[in-house]
Amino acid sequence: MEELISKCWLINKAFQIGVQAIDEELKTIIHIADDNEPLLVIEARKRMLVELQKELGKANKDSFCYQTDSFQLSYLAVPIHEDELYKGMVVAGPFLNERVTDHMIWNVIKDNNLENNWLKRIETYFKSLPLLANSYLAIGDLLVNIVIHPHVKAQIIAAKNSGEQYRLDVEPEDYDQSGIEIKQRYEAEKKLLHYIEIGDKENAMKAMLDHHTGDFLYRVPGNPLRARKNITFSGNTMYRIAAGNGGVEPQYLHAISEKFALKIESAVAMSELNTIDVSMIDEYCEAVKNFAIKGYSPVVKKALMYINLHFNESINLQSVADEIGFNRTYLAKKFKSEINLSVIDYIQKKRIDEAKFLIDLGRLSTTDIGLQVGFSSYNYFCKVFKEITGMTATEYKRSKQVEKEANA
């Protein structure tokens, strides 16, 4: 059993893919996966496991099964045998065989009879999955060999040039004026993380200006955008840790971190990454401020966490109350007294804040943005946007374009 679990971790780390080991009674032995899977995907996989079991139960031990479900999610399954008897299977997946496109997502929504508001959630989930394309056949072959053969613990050997005395790549005498600048930058970094930890957004923003990232674009020759993304990923990790130190619960931190990781990876311009930098600090500080410092009651904390994770879905006061397990009237009263907004007003504010962020990125039409942030119609989105910001979404977009041109 220990060797099987070890092999599952090996597969996960080698191919960056989810892995599940299941016994002959379809009971899970180990399941290594991200926790952002939609429930519909989980249920579809459960049904598919039954079919995989039927195929592998009658196959020889050096076989693997490949299957794609109605969500266009693909899986590889390899049988586990003990004394020639079928004892279960190792399933790797889900993964994609084609790039994520709007056409693909709309087909998935249509084939599974889903509402249109699933568009953004499915897109976000799909973009978090590995794209194997034609390499899945070679990976299937490797999985068979990993599972059926005894695991051999490899030894790592570091080679050195013979006859040369080992020398540190960086010596103390290399610390010159540039070293002083680096020290100052790391001091500024400490300040930035401290302000995020206490939820002080204003000072965190000031510290961010002092904490210039330096010219590290040389780290990925010929691809400065990739280098800038790597720096932004690093910031996302540091901010998440700082907010965690400030008392924000792990599951909420994970959701924030995953959201920004996807936005960073999908960015196509340096200006988008600059916008994401500011938005990350803003949201992590708000998380500390809302969930750690103010000390909201348990019912309000649960409501805030649920709304902040699901505001782009079709939710209202009743659905939030049902989800967190509190009476609707009690929730409404406590929320209003502690947040000074009704549950619905807070949901709308979150949606408009996200819409402003997407407008700042400048990659989607205002019509698409309205649907992505959870509004059922474009007209209703425009109405709420103007009520909260004092201008229409189109006017806001135009003002941002003028601002960018003035700063160019």
Image (spheres, rainbow, N blue to C red):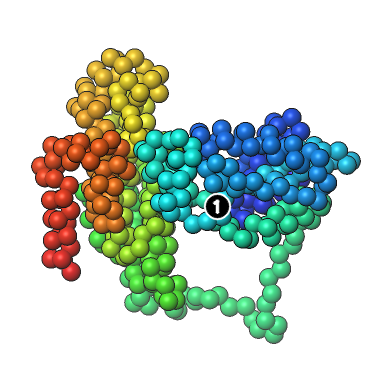
Residue 25: x, y in percent? 74, 30
**Displayed quadrant of residue 83:** top right
Q: Is residue 287 above or below residue 334?
A: below
Q: How many marks?
A: 1
Q: Along the horizontal axis of the image, is 31 left or right of 340?
A: right
Report the front residue among 48 and 331.
Answer: 48
Residue holding disc 1: 96
Q: Amino acid at mark 1?
A: Leu
The residue shown at (33%, 29%) is 315
Residue 335: x, y in percent? 26, 23
Viewport quadrant of the C terminus: bottom left
Report the front residue among 16 and 335.
Answer: 16
Residue 51: x, y in percent? 69, 37
Residue 241: x, y in percent? 42, 47
The residue furthest bottom is 163
Callout 1: 10 Å neighbours few (<14), some, many (20+)?
Answer: many
The residue shown at (71%, 64%) is 156
Residue 188 in sight in this render? no
The residue furthest left is 390
Q: Along the horizontal axis of the image, is 24 left or right of 266?
A: right
The residue shown at (24%, 54%) is 360
Report the front residue among 112 and 172.
Answer: 112
Q: Along the horizontal axis of the image, is 135 left or right of 71?
A: right
Residue 129 in sight in this render? yes
Q: Is residue 116 above or below residue 229?
A: above
Report the front residue among 157 and 172.
Answer: 157
Secondary structure beneath dot 1 equals loop
Viewport quadrant of the N terminus: top right
The residue shown at (73%, 37%) is 53
Q: Along the horizontal axis of the image, is 195 left or right of 19?
A: left
